[in-house]
Structures are given as C-alpha cells and as structure tokens.
Amino acid sequence: MPITLDSTITDLPGVGDSYAQKLEKLGVNTARDLLLYFPRRWEDFSHVTKISDVKAGEQVSVKGVIFDIGTKRSKRGMPVTEAVITDDSGSAKAVWFNQPYLEGSLKKGDEIYLAGKMEWGFGQLNFVSPAYEKAKEAEDELRHTGRIVPIYPETAGVTSKWIRTKVGGLTKLIYNLKDHLPDNVKKRHDLLDLSAAVRTMHFPESIDELKKAQKRFLYDDLFCLLLSVLANKKELEKNKAITIKYNEAVGKKFVDSLPYDLTNAQRKAAWEILKDIARPIPANRLLEGDVGSGKTVVAAMAALMTANAGYQVAILAPTEILARQHYESFKSLLSSFKDIEVVLLTGSMTGKEKEDALLKIKNGDVQIVVGTHAILSENVEFWTLALVIVDEQHRFGVAQRMKLKKANGETDAMPHFLSMSATPIPRTLAITVFGDLTLSVLDEMPPGREKVDTHIVPPAKRTEGYRFIDQRIEEGRQVFVICPLISASDKLGVKSVVEEADNLKKVFSKRKVGLLHGKLKPAEKEKVMNDFKEGKLDILVSTSVIEVGVDVPNASIMVIEGADRFGLASLHQFRGRVGRGKHKSYCFLFTDSKNEKTLERLNALSLLNNGFELAEKDLELRGPGELLGVKQSGKIDSTMMRVLSDPLIIKEVRETAEKFIVKENLDDYPKLKEKVAEFEVAAKLE
Ligand code: ADP
Ligand code: MG
C-alpha cells in the first residue's frame, strides 16, 4: 500500500509497535504528524573541508576513506572504536565510545562523511564521537553530515538520527500538504508555502532559508492565534445586550456615600465601563489593577447602575471565602440604596435557604447575586441578567457566555461582561491572547499605601527572621505564612502546610496558629478566616488558596515558604495581602535555593513593587501560561514565547488578521478554521 499523509506511523518501513508507542508520546501518530514534528534546533555541519585544513574546535564535516578501524577495551572495560580516515590532504583519527556495533557497519575502504569537532588528545587532533554517514547510502542527499543538521526534541528511545532518517524517507509526501494560509496573507508578509517551509525546517539548505521557514511558522501561528481571538470577538458582537443608561443622580449619590475620594484611575475606569454597558452590544472588558488598587468599588458602580435600571447583576468569585467577602463589600457599598437587594448563592447553602434565593433570582426580586463560578454550572435561572462581573478570571469563552444568555428568562440579550484581575497583563499579551477584551487599568493606588519591605531569607537567617516576626506579633500584628503544597509527600523538599503549622506551633509556642487549606470544609475555612480577621489567631498558615482577595489590614507580615516554587505574579499577589493597613509591612521569601537564576528572580521582587514590571519579567522568564495561571494550550505558550522578542510582528500580523475577519468568512477556509481552533483559549473553571 502506498504511504500517504494519513498513513499510520506503523505503515512506514522499519516502524514497529514499540517505536509507535514512543512516537505517540510526542503526538506523532501519522506520517503527517511526523512531517510536522519540527526540530528544536539545528547544527551547522555544512562546511565540508579537507582534513588537513580542520582546526581544533571548529564545527565541520570531512569526507574520506576508512583506512583502518578497530575496537579495543578501555581500562574500565568500555569498548572504544577507533578509525583512521584519509583524504587526499591527510588523515584523521575518529573515536567512538561504547558503540561496538560500529565495527560491523563501517568497514575498511568505505567512503564516509564525518561531522563533528576535532579536539586535541594524545598529542594529535581527533574527532570525538562524530556523526557519520556512508557516502553511498546518502545517494540523493546527506542527512546527518555535510549539511545543516536538524536536532529534534528527543524522547527516550527516539533519536534525532532516527527521526531524520524517517522524515528523509517521506520528503516526497511533503508536497501533498495543503496549505491553510490564504495566498494574500503569504504574499503580504512574504511567507514561504507550507511544503517548502516544512521541507526547509527539516533539511535547510542555508541559514537564510531556515530563517524564512521559521518566519513562516511564526507568522502562521500568530495569525491563527489572533484569528481565534478576533473571531470570538466578532461572534460576541453579533449578540444584543441590554443598554444601561447612566443615571447622574444615582452616580453622584454613590460617590458621595463613600468614605474616601475615588482615585483618578478609578474614576476613569468607572467611566469607561459605564459607557460600555450603555451600548446595545455585549461589553467585554477587563479591569486590571494591582492588589489593593480598589477594583471592587469600580465594579460596584457598574452593578449599581444596572440594578438601578431594574436589571440583574451576577458577581462571580473563584472561592466561597471570596464570594462571601464580595457579598459583604457590595452590601456595604450599596447600603444607601435601600431598594437594591444583594443575595449570596454558594454551594454550601442549605436546601431551604438556597431555594428561596433561587426563587427570588428567577422572579427578579433580587438585583445583585454574588456567588462562586458554580452559578454557571448549576443552571441558575435569572429574570433578566444584564451584567456579569467575574473576579480573578481573565476571560470567558463564547460558550460560557451563551450559557448565561440562555439563563435569562425574558430576553434573549447577552449579559455585559466585566472581568477583574490583579494580574497585570503585559502589552504583548494584551493585544494577542486578550485581544478580544477592552482594558481598563487602575495604575494608581489609593493614597497612603506604603511599600512592603521584601527580603530573601536563606536557611541560615531563618531563626533571626522568626525572632523579628515574634516581635511584631508582640506589638499586636498578625502574620500570613504561605506554603506551596498540601500533602506530606514532600519529595521536592517543599514544606507541607500541615507540617509547617505544627512546626510553627513549636517555634511560636506562645502564639495562636491557624491552618487554612483547600481540603477543609467551607464552614471550617470560614471559621479560620473569621478567627484571623477578628484577631483570635496570630499566625495563619495557608496554601495558596488565600492568594486572591482577602482583606485583613492588621496583618503586616507575609512569609512565603519555598518561595522559589512560585512565579513572580503569584508572589506579588501574596505580598499584596499585607501593607493594607497603617502598619509598616514586610514580606519574607524563605528559600533553600542557591540557584543564581532563581535568586535573581526573587530579587526582582525586592526591587520592584510594580505589578506590571514584575509581570514583564515573569513573562520573559517563565512564559505566558505560568504568568496567567490559566491552563492554556502549549501552542499559545510557544507562539507567545517566540513573538516576545519582536513585538512589532504582533502589530503587523494583527492588522492582517483584522482585515481578514472583516472581509472574509472563516467558514470558507476549512483548513484554516481547523488550525485556528487549536488556538482556542480555554477559560479556567473549577
Ligand atoms: P482590589 O483591587 O485588590 O480588589 P479592593 O477593591 O479590595 O482592592 O480595595 C482595597 C481596599 O482599598 C479596600 O479596603 C477599599 O475600601 C479601599 N479603597 C478602595 N478605593 C479607595 C480609595 N479611592 N481611597 C481609599 N481607599 C480605597
Ligand atoms: Mg479584589
């Protein structure tokens, strides 16, 4: 049977089940997959030189005849194969370790290519473990020597040499690949065709050509990522939304009721949001601002305007603790508006209580519903939901919003969407992965916030650190301690939260230590949180569940155990839990790490207090997936890592994608549509 692109990998000559299993782990199941499995890097052995001209340390290939070959054993018993190769300029010695089978395949008199570096040893230059290729087997084309050689991401048992040989056997098939990129896109950006680019990725003729192929795939991936985002946007904008008119008297009454003046940034963001929800198409806005920048009051203004117009608002938080906290905040912020009712809806509510709440929501007797994301999955029925506010979640997929639209009884309007996030999104990400959202940024803190002193604490300074902390507790302050893992299976040397609490009870024997982690029942969690808020606990040991949102102004110390295990964005969020009251605050990064890179990263935290700068650094060091804490496809991560170094490309490709979305219909391009779907950003829902 002839091999086609769709042939399963075991149809290829020399590929059995055991190889198929290994390849499956690389995502390679068909001939097509193998062709699209690209090298991670390349080594340039294209310089074929005369043996006498080879210089030490130079990366070269030579062509010669085997004058002699033999295998002996080293003192430790390892087989060492040595060969002497000659050409018309001279001879060279090649040495391979632990490859006794070489003697069976390379014979005296064979004409071969060697690729590698020559190094000094025993008073002469030798090729050490060079790649080799018999001249008569490289009939059409050299694969492993005498060229730019592809090095693939390898898995145990599948070597680059093996992949090269198999791909080499399939080169004719490459020309059957159908290109998904529209011609005009390729033309505009001067991109290679898919087949030419694939061919070049595996077997480039020159570095220039290789760069062109890489460019093609970078633009390709970025174009598809942007199309995915823009198609989402277009899809949303087909929907109608309820227009919420701005009511000046209500706005003024609200602002006057606050115990503080809004910052300029808050005013501007509120205005942007209110303008947004006054339009008849669904808003899709992200309100970002550092921890403590005051996002809640801005969101409350939009909620108020919506409720006042007679429609409903849903406010979704990632955890029950936070839902409860938002419930309290919104109730208090809107307390001067007597006819606006706020209700809490959580998973731990009992039957009767919950039924009442659900009925009120359905009948429209309550305007503001605060709950966890579970509201979405539980099919809560609304009377007329006009605005959804989501805390600490970056985006909602079209599917989730359609669900909310369906939850609406009377109207077929889709709710406006406002997301709040403390993760500052660097510009490069904002216009790509988040290109379907409009941004409002709180780039100004309410007055009176002090910088949190941040220090890295190595093991030797731990005792001193504890002493300092104990003094602050003596003065009446409280302490957060964050640990990376819950379980005691501590293979990574990471302190578990339970062990750490026990340990701290000994270290701080006079103090009261509480414990908070995700495996506690909601009622238990709440009790611990309340005890801490009310000052009944001095130290709260917690996993990262408290990462988002909780507000305890008397807590002035944040201790992070195993700090090296967290990204800068998370660490910055933890730190944001303190420095909220009038007390001088501290953040201690406990780490055993001696790794220079790690310490550099942690040090950025003591130097920088600005979430945006930290996010840029994190993006650079760890990639977008880590930064955003969302489960994204590796494709997006890898695409973004590649464009980071050249943000101008983003602008250029974005213009093309925008033009395409306006002028064309993705349905007319099925191949492209398939590719675009791979870039769908998954929203994180528990
Ligand atoms: P975040 O952006 O982290 O959600 P919050 O909305 O919880 O921040 O606000 C943090 C604290 O700042 C709250 O206690 C809030 O009452 C207070 N706050 C908000 N805006 C202002 C302001 N303009 N002036 C003073 N305090 C403010
Ligand atoms: Mg908040």
Image (tube, grey):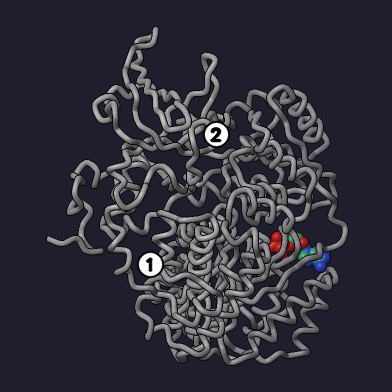
* Residue 176 position by quadrant: bottom left
Mark number displayed over residue 142? none
Labels 2 and 1 touching (C-beta < 8 A): no
For disc 1, the neighbor class at 10 Å (few under 14, some 14 to 19, many from 20) is: many
Instruction: Please name the residue that numbered disc 1 is placed on.
Output: 195
For disc 2, the neighbor class at 10 Å (few under 14, some 14 to 19, many from 20) is: few
Q: Image check: 450 left or right of 524? A: right
Instruction: Where is residue 48? Give x, y as percent.
Output: 48, 42
* Residue 14 position by quadrant: top left
Q: Image check: 520 left or right of 329? A: left
- The residue type indicated by label 1 comes to Ser
Above-or-below relation of 202 to 189: above
Q: Nearer the viewer, mark 2 or mark 1?
A: 2
Is residue 253 or residue 133 the one in the foreground? 133
Instruction: Where is residue 288? Give x, y as percent.
Output: 68, 66
Mark number displayed over residue 53? 2
Q: Residue at x 77, y 37 (%)?
A: 455
Where disc 2 sits, the SS reads: helix
Q: Residue at x 54, y 28 (%)?
A: 493
Instruction: Where is residue 625? Give x, y as percent.
Output: 54, 55
- The residue type indicated by label 2 comes to Asp
Please, which residue is most extreme toward the right here?
448
Where disc 1 sits, the SS reads: helix
Is residue 188 or residue 247 the one in the foreground? 188
Q: Residue at x 68, y 66 (%)?
A: 427
Q: Image check: 326 left or right of 101? A: right
Residue 608 visible in image: yes
Above-or-below relation of 609 to 258: above
Cα–Cα gap, marks 2 and 1 = 37 Å
Is residue 160 or residue 442 the one in the foreground? 160
For marks 2 and 1, the one nearer the N-term is 2
